Image (cartoon, rainbow, N blue to C red):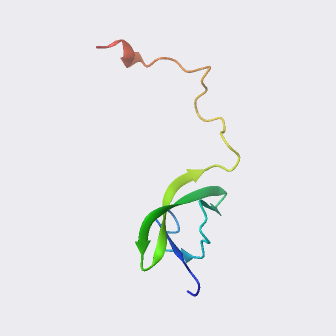
Amino acid sequence: MADTDAILQGGPRDGTEFEAEDAGLVELEIDGMVHRYIPTTQQAAGRTVYTYDGMVDPRGAQDGVESATDRQASPLADEG
C-alpha cells in the first residue's frame, strides 16, 4: 500500500494500513456504528500505531432495556 504512515491495531479493522496525516482520532462507520482508534507512541514497521478505543452509537445514548426511573435495588443487596 503506497503512502501509508499508520496502522490500526485491534477492533474490526485490525492491521489496516492508512494515511493518518497525524490525526488525533480516527472514526470509522461500520454497520451503523462508529469505531474509534487513537494514536499511540508505538511504531510498527515505521508506521504510527492507532489502537482500538471502542464502538459508539452515532445517535448518542439510547433508551435501553432498563429505565433509571423503573430500576429497583437487587434482592441480594439486603443479604450480607
* Residue 10, visible in the rendered structure: no
> Which residue corresponds to the image point at 66% horizontal and 39% vertical from the top-left?
62
Q: Quadrant of the C terminus?
A: top left
> Which residue corresponds to the image point at 49% horizontal and 71% vertical from the top-left?
48
Q: Position of residue 42 (x, y in %)?
A: 42, 67
Looking at this view, is 72 or 55 the one in front? 55
Residue 29's image quarter?
bottom right
Q: Position of residue 52 (x, y in %)?
A: 49, 59
- Above-or-below relation of 51 to 16: above
Q: Position of residue 69 (x, y in %)?
A: 62, 20
> Which residue corresponds to the image point at 45% horizontal and 79% vertical from the top-left?
46
* Residue 38, visible in the rendered structure: yes
Looking at this view, is 56 or 68 the one in front? 56
Q: Quadrant of the N terminus?
A: bottom right
Looking at this view, is 32 or 15 the one in front? 15
Residue 61's image quarter?
top right
> Which residue corresponds to the image point at 67% horizontal and 57% vertical from the top-left?
32
Q: Position of residue 55 (x, y in %)?
A: 56, 53
Residue 45's image quarter?
bottom left
